Image (spheres, rainbow, N blue to C red):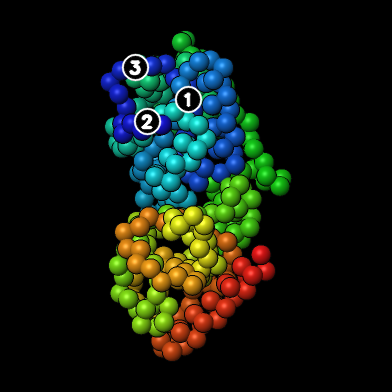
Amino acid sequence: MRVFRGLPSSADVPIALTIGNFDGVHRGHQAMLSRLVEAADDLALQPAVLTFDPHPLEFFASSAAPPRLSSLRDKIGRFAAQGVARVYVVRFDARFAGLQAEEFIDDVLVQKLAVRWVLVGEDFRFGKGRTGDLSTLRNRARSFSVEAMHTVEVADERASSSAVRAALAEGDLEHAALLLGRPYAMSGRVAHGRKLGRSLGFPTANIAMRHKPPLTGIFAVRVHGLGAHPRTGVASLGVRPTVMENAQPLLEVFLFDFNESIYGRRVTIEFMHKLRDEARYENLDALTRQIETDVAQARGYFAAQG
C-alpha cells in the first residue's frame, strides 16, 4: 500500500475512492472499505482512501474535540489489512477548510485524484460550511459515479465512532469490541519512565499518550509485539493521582511472568476487561496493596477466559 502525505498536483492513475476520518475503523468503516475494494476490483481501479489529519473537529474546536480512537499509524494499518492500495492523508487546515464544495469536487476529486467511482456515507458533508452533500456530489459528477453506503447496525445500534467512544468512556469494553469487531487497542513505543513501578515491585512498560485517551482506569490487557504470542498483564491508563500532580496521561503496563528489556519496542495493547477506575491513595504502601489486588484480579480474569 502507498501512503501519500498531501495531494498530488495531478493524478497518475484513476482510482475508486472513499472519504472520511475513519476514527477507530469500526465495523461500519470496515463495511465501507470492503465495498470499496470490491467495486475497485470490478472496475479495474485502485482502491483508495482520502482521510484527514488532524480530525476536522480538532481544527475547528480543539478543546471540544472528542478523544481519538486510533492514531494515524494504526488507522493506516487497518486500511492495509482491508486491501486498500492507496491512502491520501490531507492536512486539515484553514486552506483546505475554505474549499467550496464545487472546488473540492473539481480540483481534488477530478484533477488531483482522477476519481472514477466514489463511495460516501448517506450523511456525508463537505466543503466550506459543510454546504456540500450527497446530492451536490451526484449533481456535479461528470467523470465519476457516486454510491452511498447504508448505515451498518450492530445489536440494533448504529456502528459509529461516537458509539465506540461512549462505550469506552463507560468502561464497557465488551460492547466497544462488538462495535469494532475486535478488542479496543492502542499502540506505541515503550519509553523510559520514573521507574516507580520497579521500586514497588511491579516494573511497567510505559507508553506516552500524544492525545487525550478515550478511556481511563485499570485494565486486564493483552500485549502484542513481544514474541509469537500475546502476553497478558494489567495496565493503568490515566494521570497517576497518587504520585503526580497535573500529569499528562500515561499508559503503564505490568506484564505477567516477563522480565526483559523492551525499551524502544513498538507494542499493541488490547484492553480486554476494566477492573476499576483510577483512584488516589494516601501513600505508596496503600497503592502497592491495590496493585497486588489488581494483578490478582487480572490473572483471575484471564484464567477464567482460558
Q: Earlier in the sequence, mark 1 or mark 2?
A: 2
Residue 155 in the image: x percent, y percent? 71, 47
Q: Which residue is mark 2?
A: 2
228 or 28, which lies in front?
228
Whether tag 3 and tag 1 are in contact, CB under 8 A, the answer is no
Question: Which tag, 2 or 3, sits closer to the chain's start?
Answer: 2
Residue 42 location (% of width, % of height): 57, 17
The residue depicted at 38 percent of the width and 77 percent of the height is 197
**Residue picked out by circle 1:** 47
> What amino acid is labelled 2 in the image?
Arg
Residue 139 rendering spot, x and y as whole percentages: 51, 15
* Residue 196 in view of the camera: yes
Q: Which of the labelled discs sits on residue 12, or is there none? A: 3
Q: Say which element carries label 2.
A: strand
On the rendered structure, is 60 left or right of 181? left
* SS at mark 3 in the image: loop
User: Label 3 neighbourhood size at 10 Å, few (<14), some (14-19), many (20+)?
Assistant: few
